[in-house]
Amino acid sequence: MKRFIDTIKHIWSIHELRSKILVTLLLVFIYRLGTYIVLPGVNPNMLAQMQSKSGEGLLGLINIFSGGAFGNASIFALGIMPYISASIAVQLLSLAVPYFQRLSKEGESGRRQINQITRYITIVVTVIQGFAYITNLKIQSGDAITSAVPMSIFIFSSIVCLSAGTLFVMWLGEKITDKGLGNGISLIIMVGIIARLPQSFLEELTSRFTSNGLIVFVLELAFLIVVVIATILLIQGTRKISIQYAKRNIMQGGKMMQAGGNRQYLPLKVNQAGVMPIIFAQALMFIPATISQAFPGSKSSFLQSFTDHTSFPYNTVVFLLIIIFTYFYTALVINPVQMADEMKKNGGFVPGVSPGKKTAEYIDNVMSRITLPGAIFLGVVAILPGIVMMFKVNQAFAYFFGGTSILILVGSILDTLQQVESHLLMRKYDGLTKGGRIKGRQGGSGISI
């Protein structure tokens, strides 16, 4: 305990770190305040119907990511999700389209152009999602919308407010990244998720208390801790390939010197794809839900099974899709041939493996072997909320047992703690842990935005 208190004192004594913490807290407070500012023309006292339905299925997941802003009909209702969608689209374009590939290789200027294109795409996505959101609001809770103004004016003004809110949240995230701690976008999502945790926790505790299931509740908390620990292992797990660099003579200061000869390691992450396979799989699984909503009179048991998160067909298909997308995304991100060529140019080689084609094949084999257990474990994490719901766990609380929620939470916290530890170690203070170093998601884990 004394060591923990000393660490807190050291953190607060570093002026730069203290300023970053205060800036982060201020910007997060502004974001949370905006989630309670309701769209003009909406009566917040008449949103009970939408609030009850926003806790189901897809709407419940979106509501969690927005920190409750979605159900509150807030100006931040869409949150940062349009920006994430645009970032994912641009990231995929950077892997497949030559123009974007060229921009990604042009350094800082190319990065600025890619960021600008991402912002333009974000506006387009926000307008489309804003219109869909207002349409859903009108269907689910039309009585909460004022009749004093024409519906066309309300829709236009609401889309403008939602677009401005998303751009402002995006700006907050960028400022947190520049002036604060951690990845701002991931931190905003994390804050939104955590904001829903106390209410979900109390609802689950109340339901278990009234049904004399306190022991079951304790077991749930113990299982949640195990899931968090396992997720940390998934995010930080790496396979190191030993690389030996040959000695070579170089001229330095008019003298001939030897360089190289040292041994380094090429770290390959077990979960190189991060949270992307889950996002892709869930995006595909939204199609049956959309079809069933478009045809409400349809009683197809096949479609109904794919809209139920606890059904066997839904979880099986999601699990298989995540394994497929994990291999697909890893193949796009990792290029063994390029790695082998760069290694060969710098005089590096894997001991016992010939440089060039053999090295590329070796890296590809290692990546394939470690991707399979990572993909299986990622699939298990993704379907855990549906599994725990089968044991009568509250749906809002069940989302914290897996899926994108737990991966973003753990990844964002690790990123932030890593930055804090770096500041401490730079000033020769002890780190946050006695042994080992806290590792974030650098290198491709997590949401790459």
Image (cartoon, grey):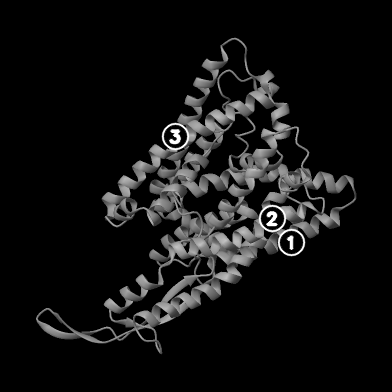
* Residue ID at (58%, 25%): 38
Q: Is residue 188 left or right of residue 258?
A: right
Q: Are marks 3 and 1 in contact (CB under 8 Å)?
A: no
Q: Are marks 2 and 1 in contact (CB under 8 Å)?
A: yes
Q: Residue furthest right?
A: 212
Q: Residue furthest top?
A: 148
Residue 12 visible, this orientation: yes
Residue assigned mark 1: 223
Residue assigned mark 3: 124
| Element class at badge 2 | helix
Relative to 357, say whether 333 is above or below.
Answer: above
Q: Nearer the viewer, mark 3 or mark 1?
A: 3
Real-space Cα separation, disc 2 to disc 1, in angstroms: 8 Å
* Residue ID at (46%, 61%): 444
* Amino acid marked by disc 2: Phe
Pick the front one: 199 or 114: 114
Relative to 251, say whether 18 is above or below.
Answer: above
| Element class at badge 1 | helix
Q: Is residue 391 left or right of residue 382?
A: right
Q: Nearer the viewer, mark 2 or mark 3?
A: 3
